[in-house]
Image (cartoon, grey):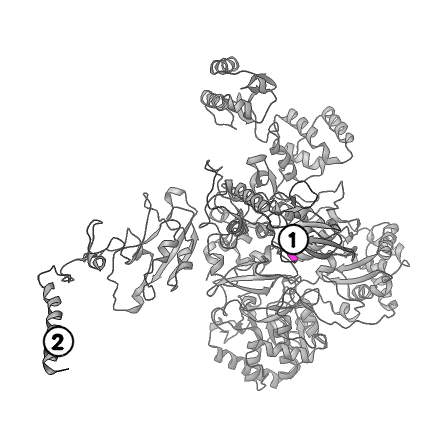
Amino acid sequence: MSQQPINIQRLSQPVQMPDEIATFSPKVEAEIDRHLAKYPVMRSAILPLMFIVQRERGYLDPPGVSYLAKRLNLRITDIWEVATFYSMLHLKPIGKYHIQVCKTLSCKLLGSDKITQLCVKKLGIKVGEMTADGRFSLSEVECLGSCGTAPMFQINFDYHENLTAEKVDQILESLA
Amino acid sequence: MSTELVKVTINAKDFQVPKGARLIDVCRENQFDIPSFCYYADLALQASCRMCLVRIEKMPKLQTSCTIICTDGMVVTTQSEEIEKARRSMLEFLLANHPLDCPVCDRGGECELQELTFDWGNLEERFIEQKNARAEKYLSPMVANDPQRCILCKRCTRVCDEWMGEDAIEAGNRGANTVIGTYGGWLNCSQCGNCIEVCPTGTLLDGTYRHQARPWELTQTISTCTYCSDGCQMSLGSRGDELMRIVARDRYVNGLNGEFLCIKGRFGHPFVNHEERIRTPLIRYQKGGRLVPATWDEAIRFTAQKLDGIVAARGNNSLAVVGSPRLTNEALYCLRKFAAEVVETENYAVADAFSLKPFFESLGGPLATHQDIRHAKTIVLIGGEPEELQPLTAKQIRQAVRNGGAKLILINSVPIRLREQAAQFIHIRPGTENAAALALAGNADDALAARKMGVEAAELEILRQTISETQGDVVLMFGGELSAEAQAVVAQMPYTFAGEGRRILLHPLALFNNSVGALDLDVNGKSVSDLLDAAGVSIHAMYMAGSLLPEHMPKCGLSKLDFLVVQELFETETTAFADVVFPAASFAEIDGTFTNNDGFVQRVRKSIEPVHQSKPDWLIVSELAKELGVDFGFERSASAVFREIAERIPAYADLRYPLLKDESHPLQVKHAIASKRELAKEIAGIRRAVAELSDDGVKVSETPQVGHELFKLGTLTDKVPQFHLLAAGNPTPASFAISPLYQITIDEGIKREKAVA
Amino acid sequence: MSIITEVIESTRAIIQGMSVTLSYIPKRKQTVQYPEEPVTVQPRYRGQHLLHVDELGREKCVACFLCAAACPSECIYIEAADDPRAPEERTGVDERYAKIYNIDYGRCIFCGYCVEACPKDAITHGYNFELSVYNRADLLKRKDDLLITKQVQSKNYRVAFSDEDVDSEWKEV
C-alpha cells in the first residue's frame, strides 16, 4: 500500500533526542560497518547494532540510542519500539547477574511462579528491577526452550534447570 | 482506480463495483453494516481488530473484509450465526482488559468501542481475572493517555506516521503488555492531536478539554477554521455560552480535511471565551489618554462625528480603510462598501503578509483542491513551508507521495521536513526562489538561475522534464517568497506544460484563512504598507478591522494619525494607538464565509452568542454607515450581505448560503481564467532581479525545528495556556501523571483558569 | 316510587354512609400534628437528594453527567473539573469531580431517574422534604446543600423501620 522509499532520511526527531551521542572505538565502528554492509535495507541491521551497543555500553543508554537512530536513519521511537519488544535488550541499567525466569506453560505448571516469588523475596526487588548494589536483575521471560527440565531460569547465558526452592537458594547464595 | 467493473455478490445480491475496490468499503456503501476498529480509509492496513470478519465462498476461514480486494464473481456473506459468534468473541477479547470507567472517560458517549459493545457485546463478561492495571498519564501538554483503555488498533501510530510523517508514537513492549508510547515518555511532536481524533476508545484524549464536559451536552456546530488558508471544516462543541472544544470527528463533520486538524485548529480556540476579550466599545477622548468604556450608541456617534469632521476638513482621501485577511467575506465586503460608498475614499487595503494579486490576474488554470493534491502525480513546491503554515496541504502532499506514489519536487532554501518525501530536492540559496520561476518558464536562463540558486543546471532540466512527462495531475505550489512577476509566470505555467493526459493545477500557499477571499473582494486595493507610509502625510484617519501583522508594526505610522478606529477581539499593539475600539465577535460567534486556498467558499457558523457586548465586524461597519447617512439595507442578516456579494462580484455569482450548507461538497469560486499571454516582460524583470542577487549566499542545511511556526505565540494562540509550554520548548515535567500545567510555570499566560472568562 | 320507599331508601343510605364514617372513630388516627410531631416517611421515600461520600470523606460523584442526561425535567447542572492532587487529598474519589453540582428544585419532579442512572451510587434521594422557601431563586440547591456531610436534616420526620407497615392502608385495598 504505502510506497515509502527504502532508505529515507529522517530529518527531524519528533521526540527529544538525548543531546549526547555515543562514540565507539574504531574496532567497534568497523564491526558496525560490517553489519551494515550485510543488509540491502539499512534499518534491517538494527538488531545486530543494538547488541553491539548494548555489549559496549552495558545497556541501551540514551547516548547509545541516539547513536543508533543517527546511524540507521531511524526515528528514536523506532529504536524504542524494537528495544522494548525483546527481553534481551535493556533500556535500563542491568545487574551483573540477570535472572530470567521462564514463565511459559511447562514452567508455569511446574511452579515458575514460586521460583519468581522466591527470587523476589531473596533479592528484595520486584520483577523488572535491579538490586541496589547492581548485582542482580530479575525478569520474567517467555519460553527458553527447556521445557523438559522445567521449571528453570537463565542467569545471563547459563541455564539452571529442574529448580527447587533449595536449588534456587543455593544458586543465589553462590552468586551473592 | 480503474473504471473496469467486477461482479460481487453480497448476501445474495449482485453488485457491480470498480475493480480494486475494498470489500469493506463496498459493503458499507451498500448498507451492509460491518463493524471495525482498526480499518481507517486511506491508511495502511492493520487487520488487528478482527471485527470485520466475513465469509467468502471458497475461502477456508472467515476473512477480514478490510484487507480483501473485490474480485470478479466473489460471493460474500456478511451476516450469519458463525460471523456473529466470531465478532462477539472478538469483542469479548478486546474488552478483557478494558476498564469499566466510562463514567469518567471523556470519550464516553462518542466512543466507537462503546457503540460496538452495544451491538456486539455480551451481557456478561466471562473474564474474571484481574485486569492489567496501568496508570493514566500525559504524553504532552495536549495529549492525555490512559493506556489501559487501549485496544491496540494502532490507528494513532499509523496516522502519526502517514499523515504527519513524524512517527512520534509507536507501540512498545510485546503481547499483552503492548502499550502505545514513546521513548522517554514525553512527546515533542507537532502536537496535531490527530491521534486523539482517530482513537476509537478513550486511550488518547484531549488534554486541554480533559474532564470538562460530556459530548452529549455539547451543541455541535459545523464551521471553518480561523487560522490558516487550508480552510479545514470542524465541529465546534459549545455548552451554553462557552466554546468547549473543537473536533473534526466524522460523526459530526465531513469536510475536505476528513478528521484531520492541526494544533491550532484543534487546540487554539480558548481565545473565544478568554477573559481578556474587549467587553464594550472603548473611546480615547484625548490623545495620550486612557481608553474609556462607552456604550455602542455613544461610540458610533463619536466615531461618525470625528470621521465627518476629518473628511470635511481634509477631503475624502485623507481617510483609509484597512481590512484583515482573517475576517469573513461579509465583513470585508462591508468594509469595502464603506470605503467606496460611505466615505468615498480610494484608500482601501487588506493587511495581508503578501499579495497574491499578480497570481490571480494571470491565473492560467484551475486551482488545485486538496483532493487534487492527494491524487496528483507530480507536485512542485516552490518555497513555503506547508508543514508549519498549511498543515493540511502538507498532509495531502505526504499522502500523495506515500500512498499515491506521486513525485514531489521541492525547491526550497531550507531542507524542510517534507524533504523526506521529496523525489527531487533542489536546495537553493535563500532569497533565490524567483529564479525557480525563471527555470520553469524555459531553459534560456538555466545557467543564470542555476548559478544564483547554487544548483546544477541539470537539476532544473530534470524538473521540467518530470513535469512534462507526467501522466495525470501536476500541482504547482508556491509560498510567499515569489515576487509579483514570478507569481505571474507561475500562474501562466498551465499553458506551457499542459498536454495530453496531463492537467496543470495551481495552489498558492496563502497565509490566512481568508487571504483568497480578501483578494477576490478587493478590486483595486492598495498595499497596506503604502497606506501606512502615507499616514500623517496624506492620510489622517484610519478605520481598521483587525490588527496589523507584526511585520507591519515597526514602520507603522499609526501614531501620526489624527483618528484611528479599530475593531478587535483583544487589546493589541494596534489598539494602543486607537481612539475608538469596537469589540468584534470572533469566528465562533458569527455567521459568514471564508474562501480557502482551494477557492472553496465555506460557511462559518455561529456556535455561541457574541460574548459580552461584541458584534460581528460587518454589523459594526453597517451601523456606522447608517449613522453616517447610508443604509446598507442588510438588516442584521449575514445572508443578505452574501447575496449582495454574489450579485456584485462575478466570481461569487449565483452563490447563496443554502448552496453552501453541505460541508462535504464545497463550492469553488469561479476565478476568471486569464488567457495565454506573452511573458517576456515579466521574465526580463525576474532575470534582472535575479542577476542582482549575490552568487555566494550560504545555504541553510539545518532542518527547522518541529513547531517553529506552529507554536509561535500570536494574539490568539497566546490565550491557550498549553501553547506557552510549547513555545518554551515543551519541557518534560517531573511527573507524567498530572498535566504539566500544574507543574511548570512559565508565565502568567500559562494559568489554566485564565482561559475561561 | 312511593314516598315511603324513598324515605326508607335514603335513611338506609345515610346509615350505610355514616357507619363507614363512625367505624373509623375508634381506629388509630392517620393525621399527624406536623410540625409538633414528626412525620413518618417510608424508607424509599424520595425527598431532597443526597450526594454521598466514601469512607475517606471524598465525594463519590465523578461528574459523569448521566444523572443530568437521565433527568426528564433538566434540573441538574454540572460542571466537571480536574483534580490533579494525590488520591488521598482529592475532593472526589477520582481525578474527575463535580466543581459545580446544582439541582433546581423548582423543576425537579422527584422521579428518581438520576438515582437509577448513577453508576457510582453517588446520588440518592434523602428524606428531607421541607423545601419551601421565601425566594424562588433559593430553590436552586448547590453542592454544599446536597452533600451528605453538609445537608441540614430536618427534625420533623422519622423514617419508618422496614418491618413497620405504615402504608398498610394502601395494602388492604
User: Magenta residues: mostly which secondary structure?
Assistant: helix
Which subunit holds the residue at mark 1?
Answer: B
Q: Position of residue B267 (x, y in %)?
A: 56, 56
Of residues B230 and C167, the one drawn nearer to the viewer in this rendering: C167
Q: Quadrant of residue A98?
A: top right
A99 vs B260, left or right, is left
User: Is B583 part of what is drawn in magenta?
Assistant: no
Residue at (55, 73) in percent of width and height: B616
Q: Is residue B240 left or right of residue B629?
A: left
The magenta region covers B24-32
**Disc 1 marks which residue?**
B11
Q: Is residue C91 left or right of residue B156?
A: left
Point 58% across, 27% down: residue: A142
Label 1 crowd bin: few (<14), some (14–19), many (20+), radius 10 Å = some
**Which numbered tag is attached to residue C9?**
2
Which residue corresponds to the image point at 48% horizontal and 15% vertical from the top-left? A169
Residue type indicated by callout 2: Glu
Query: Is B28 in the magenta?
Result: yes
x, y percent for residue B107: 51, 52
CB atoms at circles 1 and 2 under 8 Å apart?
Answer: no
Residue placed most toward the observer, A174 or B358? A174
Determine whether the residue tagged by mark 1 lies in a helix, strand or loop. loop
